[in-house]
Image (cartoon, helix red, strand yellow):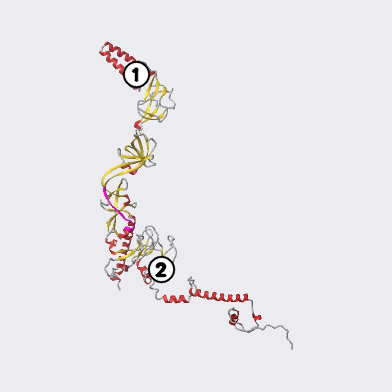
Amino acid sequence: MTQDNTPDRPTAPSKRGLVARVRNLLPFGTKRRSVDKQALSLPPMTRGMQAFSLIMFFLLGSGLTAFWIINPLQIPFMPQPMQMAAMEESAPAADAAPAAAYQCPMHPEVMESKPGECPICGMDLVKVDTPAGAGGGAQAHTEESAVYQCPMHPEVMESKPDECPICGMDLVKVDQVPAASTKKTASGEREILYWYAPMDPTYVRDGPGKSPMGMDLVPKYADENMASDEGVIRIDPVQVQNIGVVSVPARSADIARHSRTVGIVDYNTEKVAWVNTKFEGWVEKTYLNFVGQEVRIGDPLFEIYSPELVTTQEEYLRALEYRDSVAESGRREPLEQADSLLAASRQRLRYWDIDDVQVETLKRTRQIKRTLVVRSSIKGLVVKIMDGALEGMYIRPGMNLYQIADLSTVWVHADIYETDIPWIREGRQATVSFPNDPTRKYRGKVLFLYPEVSEKTRTLRVCIEVANPDGKLRPGMYADADVEGPLLKNTVVVPQSAVIRSGERNLVFLDLGEGRFASREVVLGVRGEGDDIQIRSGIAPGDLVVTQAQFMLDSEARIQEAIAKFMKRGTASAATDEAPMPAEHQH
């Protein structure tokens, strides 16, 4: 029997479907038919990679399909089945869902239907919900209640786009009170006109809610309408407390105008003296050698030799000897002549500033002194010395040697503004303080006013005399002066913080109680010490005046006045439209 040693040729695989082939490749698939296992077998690694790839492709396709159907990121694909179904289901309820709007927190008139930035201030718009059911009537509400207002002047309101007549800015569109909101409730409660934001009265809605700042809207009642009480504004008492309104009564008191200014300390010229001689001679010894040295009355200043003084001493001694000789004779008439001659000689020495002590010494000793001492007749400080070294100097009559100033009183030269000049008079009391000791106050009085007003500073200089008992005040020091004006008795005074100054007029707000406030124009008087100011006319003692938050009341008054004027104008316009046309125009 012949044996065929030819190796077995691999048998070609059977033609099977793709599914069968995949199943055969899977490790958990059914066993393949007995073909030739060695011919169809692949390495284990290759079969695993093929199986893994098929599984991953299957999972990836399933995930993409689910992502396309669900669309969790809201990517704008073509309409998806689930989204289309949700839209069909929610279509009947779309009218009842609240519509969302985006509004600027600082400019409520800026509203958009999608997120963005405010074109005025650049802030991000915040999302606000409009009341339910507003979708169908939003357009009608806007057409009926929207007005145009100036951003800088809220009192300027128009029913159509225009420009502000004050500043020329374009009016912006704001929502205003709808006509339907003025109806009374069936239960007879107070009629609510509209709801507004406490911090922004221009933010008005027809129902309760939240303002862009997160605060609850407050109602505006019909009995608070400005048209019923001209000049009076009404604010909810809760809102009055929230904005911090503080009121104090006007009182009757005495008040004086105070003129505060600055000045410079100077010498009291009435107590400044020059030391000189009435004769010629030579200074042989000085006792004052530097500026600032203190001098008392009678202190020696210098010793001087003068031939005229020596001659006068000789005349005095001869008159004295003649008088003694005549007195021994006992004759009356010659004695009177001798006494007169002696008195004349002594008076001559006094005229030359020789004091009585030196004259008595000359009378007692009967010896002529070569030099005599010149003594001070004033106390104070040495201000000036003619020469640093006076010893040996020849002096002539009238030559100034020393200047001595008494600092027991000083003058303060203060500058008064032109507006305060009518209130300053001679003899007015003044209070002066100094930076070296601001707690100490010096009392003084106005001595005189200088005749001219400074062309550069537009001020008038006044002189204030101030006592300086301890000598601490020195010329050239800087001073703060407060000059008191005339005292006005029994006048109406209020705190200065209660007055609103607009430049053309002055206003105060009166607290009438129960959330009612009224503005009054007043005429101001003098400003007193502290925070008081005189009211000449406009209010009476006992009236409650607002001292805090009056600027918010002023803004509220302007807004309510503008709203009232707009409502009156709208009512008049509606009445004109409803009126029948004249007969000649009817057909």
Name the residue type under label 1. Answer: Thr
* Amino acid on which disc 2 is placed: Ala
Rendered-image quadrant of the C terminus: bottom left
Q: Is residue 498 left or right of residue 67?
A: left
Residue located farthest toward the bottom when viewing the structure as drawn: 1
Of residues 4 and 461, the one nearer the viewer is 4
Q: Quadrant of residue 301?
A: top left
Q: Report the span colored magenta.
A: 241-252
What percent of the width, then of the height, locates residue 582? Answer: 28, 69
The image shows residue 530 at horizontal and vertical percentages of 32, 46
| Residue 103 image-quadrant placement | bottom left
- Give above or below for 191 relative to 291: below
Q: Which residue is mark 2?
A: 100
In the rendered image, residue 510 lying in the magenta stretch gets the answer no
Q: Residues within 10 Å of mark 2 (few under 14, many from 20)?
A: some
Estimate the x, y position of residue 223 in percent, counting from the top left: 27, 63
* Disc 2 secondary structure class: strand
Mark 1, Cα crowd under 10 Å, few <14 / some 14-19 / many 20+, is few
Taking the image as drawn, is residue 192 in sight?
yes
State the residue at coordinates (28%, 55%). Answer: 511
